[in-house]
Amino acid sequence: VPVEIVARGSKALEAYHRAIEEGKTSVKRVPIMFIGQGQSGKTSLKRSLIGEEFNPEECSTIGIETDPSYCKVSTEVWKMGEATHERDSSMEPISFEKHTAQYIVNSLEKNERRKELKPSPSRYDNVPEKKGGPSSLNNNCVSSGAPKVKAVPEEIASLVTRLLQVVRVDEDKDEIFSTLWDFGGQSVYYSIHPLFLTRGAIYLLVYNLNRDPEEKSISRVKRGLFKSIKDVLSKKSNMDYLNFWMSSVSSLVPNSEKPHETPSTSMQPELLQPPVILVFTHADKPHKGADPEELAREIFGNLKEKSYGKQIVDFFVVDNTKSGSKEECEGVIRLRKGVLDTAKKLPQLKEVIPIKWLKFEKAVKETVEHGSKWIYVEDAKRIALEVCGISTKEQFPTMLNLLHDQRILIHFDDTRELNKIVILDPLWLIDVFKEVITIPPFKKSKKEHTEQWKKLEKRGILEKRLLEDLWDPLLDTRENFDVDSLINMMEKFGLLCPWPSSDESGSPSEYLVPSMLMSPPKNVTDLFSSAGIPSLFVKFKSGQLPIGLFPRLVLMVMQWCTREGLNQEHPKLYHNFVRFYTHPAKGISLILLCRSSFIEVVVHHGNQDTHQVEFARIVCRQLELILECMRREFHWLKNMAYEMSVCCPICCTRKTVKYCDTHYVSGCKEEECLHFWSESQLHDCKMPVVCTRRVDAGEYRVALEPFASWFPFLHKTSFTSSIFLGEGEQALVLFDGLVQALQLRTCVADGVVALFHESLSLDLASLEQPDPETKHQIRCICLKAKSTDRLDVVKRLRQITPAGTTGPLLPEACDVANIPIRQRENLTIHLSGKY
């Protein structure tokens, strides 16, 4: 029988229905993502892999670029589709039609083999088959919402014909395909990259061997309204950017799977996902004529020693200038094999999925072709059920997650707002976000937003009305587009966060865009050494700060300062740095500096005093409270683990290791080499606390008294605070928790009074009719309350104690001349007995 008839016959139709209802297939595809600094040779490397000619005038990639067609990952030149029939979407290696056709062919061949094995006729062959037996198609297939067809669709029938005519080899089953993502290396675009990083990809981290790893990197350039601005104050080296990229990829690994979280007795996975391959370009022009292999090996070894080292599987040295020539670079040939070997180890390539999921993917692509860049999740569910027969309760969420991991589409279900929409075209989303992090050149024809653009450029503050005007040309004309969902997506990845302002509806009217902030002046680090007390470090166990955490933390600290009446001057905001002028009268300020693995905190005064120490302890507890609130409020921070820590004064000084046994250098500045003592370690450690890391240290006992500025339990008079009542009166000791409650304005007056009850085991009757000792204790807490400006506590105690017990509301040592006029007049009248 001709294959054309077989491909359209009843058996093929039966197999087709079975394919779209219960058929499964293996989709062997993996995104390959080119990451690294600007002008490192990522685009040229892609050209080398796909066999295109080297372009010495290659322009820098803007944002992210990806080729929509698939390439076959092999040891040969990667072909981006074929020049003939492969351009037909139905013949793409990853398509609903091709996988369905393959399923039909396999079913037909299986039937043929069964016929060949059929036994010779016997006297039982003429026995009629029982009705309703297993041969019924309806009994074999699960019904779905997808409509039944009476003939195999022509594009699938044509594919079946082709597949029946060719001789297939087993190697076809192991073919792996990929889409190539080229990430722009300019740091201005770094803020949008995390949105598109996925755990299911292979990463090629590209580095230019023409650059010295330890030298300062090329300054970040921010486009301004009238001119471009160089961030000349940035201190980041080329190696810092390698660490940045590795930290970004490492953040995709769940904490439970990271090596330091896995017990030594358990089995380590063969490949820690996502895998990273280091590719060193410009082998023809290495820095200072050094041997390119030696230089690459040194950098590779440096990165392998870090916490994310297990993700780096190999390194390759390439010369992209040979791309497209007869004499191909040997490093590129080896790289292709290395990528293929790595891809074969990925667990997702062994998984099978329902074929109808590919039908949904086809529907998504058709929707994009018709102009829709996004749809509501309810519309996606309707397509899945009615067109593809996919159960919305069981299969739909899993399918959406798979397509999201492959970055075929983008959908986050962390919150109700994020869950509302499905982004069908990731590249469109890049264009939407680029509008926020770049400032267009001034044009006379568009003057209406000049002041708003200047505000964004100078202060990093974006007004919502400007944001909506920016997005208006990119959004379609459908009504009720949920702009808030896009804003929430940007908040999730730290692209922006609400600024303390609101419109009539109570929604934020302004947003902070962290990527618009410039680096702080070089000498801000001097503030930490001149603070009067040592720094506090919020150290993250994962080895890197969660994406978007610092801007959100700055915002919440600002809100707290405002509530407490501490935000009397505008804070100074820079990239990864902020200074709050909390107590202008006393010269005290709060400073936060963000690093890759910790946040450094200091309360600056110059000379240590009681007010500075008291405020430092409040800050420490408040930061813990804020971080816990963030961990519970934001789904993507639920696994965040951190410790309040201090830097060891024996082996480290000014955030450098005096002598590093890992790198064999003095003054090592690598963050992972610093030695920290966490609050829990100091609390549980037996005295004395010693550090033996520095072999040439004379005194190796750690002096804990300086750290009592943050952790009160380290003070020699632990858990107490002394109050002097005046001449001739004995000093009284207050429970330190009560002192902190007075200092923390978020603890209301009733809460302070209740804590006072508990600390002294008092009941209400003891306050209503206090004995001399209780009066003494009440007077003591009132004095402390007044010294911390907590008159609300004194007034509350006045309501429940006899007159005169609490003392005056004014300070005890207040000069009569300094008493407010109205109160002085009233006092004069009362003392003179004249009304």
Image (cartoon, rainbow, N blue to C red):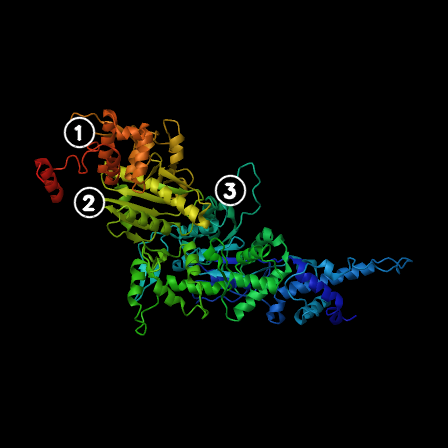
Q: Is residue 376 above or below residue 244?
A: below
Give the residue pinned by disc 3: 259
Q: Is 204 displayed left or right of 664 in the figure?
A: right
**Nearer-N-terminus badge (1/2):** 2
**Residue drawn at (40%, 30%) of the image:** 684
Q: Name the amino acid, label 3.
A: Pro
Q: Determine the secondary structure under disc 3.
A: helix
SS at circle 2: loop
Q: Residues within 10 Å of mark 3 (few under 14, many from 20)?
A: some
Neighbourhood count class around disc 1 (C-alpha, 10 Å): few under 14, some 14–19, many 20 upward = few
Question: In the image, which is nearer the foreground, mark 2 or mark 3?
Answer: 2
Q: How much space separates mark 1 and mark 2, taking CA atoms?
A: 26 Å
Residue in the picture at 35% in, 53% down: 216
Quarter that holds the C terminus: top left
The label number, if any, that marks residue 585 in the structure image: 2
Q: Quadrant of residue 176?
A: bottom right
In the rendered view of the protein, which quadrant contains the N terminus? Answer: bottom right
Q: Which residue is mark 1?
A: 726
Q: Amino acid at mark 1?
A: Gly
